[in-house]
């Protein structure tokens, strides 16, 4: 026996499923009327779910694009000349690494202007 094409068989199966659904429709109508108040909540939930899923897919595409760009154009490790960072500026002489200067309590001596006092001044003072 010659088998029909896959698309033909799938169409016949879809038609059979539609007939079965039409036969069961009167019994399902009563269920549909009782479930009617929950439709807006279900619709809103499915919309939010679709929105979040689309956002996840977009993020996955962006990450994949970042990986492709990084493989084509590798990141440079050197620092641009125009970039400045806090570590580039020193606020005084650097302490020697051989013998740390200690205060009277065994702590490293630091400039008193850099140490927070913990006192709060009133706003109107």
Image: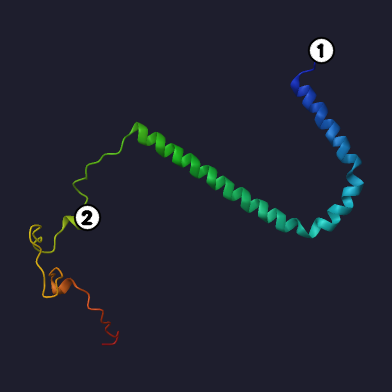
Quadrant hosting residue 91: bottom left
Quadrant in which the N terminus appears: top right
Tell which tag, 1 or 2, sits nearer the viewer: 1
- For label 2, the SS is loop
Q: Please, is residue 76 above or below residue 103 in the view?
A: above
Kindly identify which numbered label has been placed on residue 2: 1
Image location (x, y in percent) of residue 78 = 22, 42
Q: Please, is residue 45 above or below residue 6 in the view?
A: below
Residue pictured at 20% horizontal, 49% vertical: 82
Kindly identify which numbered label has been placed on residue 20: none
* Residue 91 appears left or right of 123: left
Disc 2 packing (10 Å; few <14; some 14–19; many ≥20):
few
Alpha carbon of mark 1 to alpha carbon of mark 2: how far?
A: 77 Å
Residue matched to label 2:
85
Instruction: Give the total of numbered labels.
Output: 2
Quadrant hosting residue 121: bottom left
Q: How is the image coloured?
A: rainbow
Residue pictured at 53% horizontal, 46% vertical: 56
Image location (x, y in percent) of residue 102 = 11, 69
């Amino acid at each position: 026996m010659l088998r029909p094409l896959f698309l033909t068989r799938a169409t016949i199966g879809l038609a059979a499923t539609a007939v079965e659904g039409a036969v069961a429709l009167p019994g399902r109508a009563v269920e549909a009327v009782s479930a009617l108040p929950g439709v807006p909540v279900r619709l809103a939930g499915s919309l939010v779910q679709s929105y979040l899923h689309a956002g996840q897919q977009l993020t996955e595409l962006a990450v994949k694009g970042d990986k492709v760009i990084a493989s084509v154009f590798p990141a440079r490790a050197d620092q641009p000349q125009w970039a400045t960072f806090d570590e580039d500026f020193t606020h005084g002489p650097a302490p020697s690494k051989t013998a740390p200067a200690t205060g009277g309590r065994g702590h490293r001596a630091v400039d008193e202007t850099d140490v927070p006092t913990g006192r709060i001044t009133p706003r109107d003072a």
